[in-house]
Image (cartoon, rainbow, N blue to C red):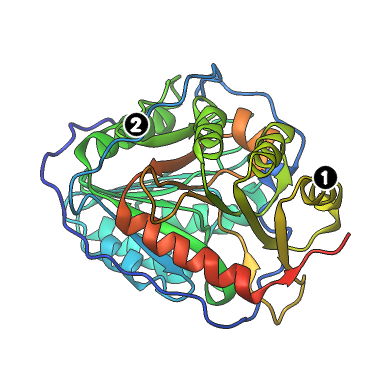
């Protein structure tokens, strides 16, 4: 059900929080998309790599960011309940009774609510949500077979998109580091809506780049490498996985050329080989324990040269894995927005300070 993109932009205030202490962690292993063997790409997710676009200077007010868990999920709920005409949601994993009830209530008052849920890896977890939404007149579909839809994006009234690193799972909210970038740039939102229309209908699409969008499987790897290779002074990184040799090689090369590279993650023996190689090349790695009493790093973020000329950042759904960058449907943003960079950089700096140094 494609729609004509509205031109009214919704202003959203910047809301963010900074980490100051460790909190309870959601257990890892609940978001396995990109650590699994790469699935075959379906006809709906074009897999031809594209050069990374240069990040555009987003108009003032075009981007803001929520830092989770400090900001809370309330601003996202309020966007859903404030919808006038339409809600589009692509979500890898949706198990949030309040969000589901809000989507159903929107549909009941005449809002056109469309939802795409991943079935390649998460059908069993998403089936209860699918059945509930379908029973409440939400237009819900399974993502095309054969491709993991790890994207986490909400669009309201074709005017405001929320590009998230987080799954909408209630039990994860209190203790997981994540970000949600709120984007009202018309070019970005139009590109997200056009891609959603095709995905919802099961049609092939090469996602438009918009002003600063990072799509898998088209321009993601090139975009992430452009941020890493463009750093001159500092790189701060958080990710849930460290399993793509091209990305790890780029991080190591940055450290060897004198860039201060910091990586903050949750400890997992699966990444020990990559950590050892990075540490030998001078990358500074700090880890949170795999513990119910520690912050869980689920964010996927890179900040280059924060506070300096040429600063830029990436925030999105992409993990550092071959599947995530080259096969899945994923969405992120590469930006020069001072507001986004400032908020993300502050969180990454705090997280690094509170984590324990990696010891091979």
For the point 62% across and 68% down, which residue is it? 352
Query: From what the image shows, is residue 174 above or below residue 67?
Result: below
User: Observer-nearest residue: 79 or 123?
Assistant: 79
Q: Which residue reaches farthest right?
A: 360
For the point 72% across and 59% down, which residue is it? 285
Mark 2 and mark 1: Cα distance apart in space: 42 Å
Crowding near pointer 2: few (<14 within 10 Å), some, many (20+)?
some
Q: Name the spot of residue 30 as percent of width and height, x first.
A: 69, 58
Residue 83 is labelled as none
Provide the residue designation for mark 2: 197
Going by the image, does 129 lie left or right of 6?
Answer: right
Q: Secondary structure at mark 1?
A: helix
Provide the residue designation for mark 1: 277
User: Observer-nearest residue: 145 or 236?
Assistant: 236
Which quarter of the figure is the N terminus placed in? Answer: top left
For the point 37% across and 35% down, which residue is it? 196
| Labels 2 & 1 near each other (Cβ < 8 A) | no
Query: From what the image shows, is residue 11 above or below residue 45?
Result: below
């Amino acid at each position: 059900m494609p729609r004509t993109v509205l031109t009214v932009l919704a202003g959203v205030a910047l809301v963010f929080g900074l980490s100051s202490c460790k909190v309870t962690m959601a257990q890892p292993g609940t978001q396995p998309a990109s650590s699994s063997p790469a699935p075959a790409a379906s006809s709906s997710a074009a897999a031809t790599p594209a050069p990374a676009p240069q990040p555009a200077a987003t108009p003032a007010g075009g981007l803001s960011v929520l830092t989770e868990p400090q900001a809370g999920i309330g601003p996202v709920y309020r966007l859903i309940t404030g919808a006038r005409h339409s809600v589009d949601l692509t979500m890898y994993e949706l198990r949030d009774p309040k969000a589901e009830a809000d989507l159903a209530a929107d549909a009941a008052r005449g809002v056109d609510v469309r939802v795409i849920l991943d079935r390649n890896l998460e059908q069993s977890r998403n089936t209860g949500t699918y059945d509930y939404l379908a029973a409440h007149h939400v237009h819900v579909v399974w993502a095309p077979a054969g491709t993991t839809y790890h994207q986490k994006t909400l669009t309201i009234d074709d005017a405001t998109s929320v590009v998230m690193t987080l799954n909408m799972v209630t039990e994860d909210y209190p203790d997981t580091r994540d970000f949600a970038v709120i984007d009202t740039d018309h070019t970005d939102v139009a590109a997200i809506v056009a891609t959603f229309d095709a995905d919802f209908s099961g049609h092939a699409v090469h996602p438009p780049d918009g002003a600063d969008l990072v799509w898998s499987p088209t321009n993601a790897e090139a975009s992430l490498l452009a941020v890493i290779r463009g750093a001159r002074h500092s790189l701060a990184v958080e990710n849930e996985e460290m399993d793509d040799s091209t990305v790890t090689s780029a991080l190591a090369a940055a450290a060897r050329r004198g860039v201060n590279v910091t990586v903050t993650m949750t400890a997992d023996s699966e990444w020990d080989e990559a950590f050892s190689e990075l540490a030998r090349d001078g990358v500074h790695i700090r880890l949170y324990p795999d513990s119910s009493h520690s912050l869980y790093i689920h964010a996927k973020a890179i900040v280059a040269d924060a506070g300096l000329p040429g600063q830029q950042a990436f925030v999105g759904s992409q993990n550092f894995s071959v599947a995530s960058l080259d096969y899945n449907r994923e969405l992120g943003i590469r930006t020069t927005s001072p507001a986004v960079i400032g908020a993300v950089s502050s969180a990454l700096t705090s997280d690094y300070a509170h984590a324990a140094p990696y010891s091979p």
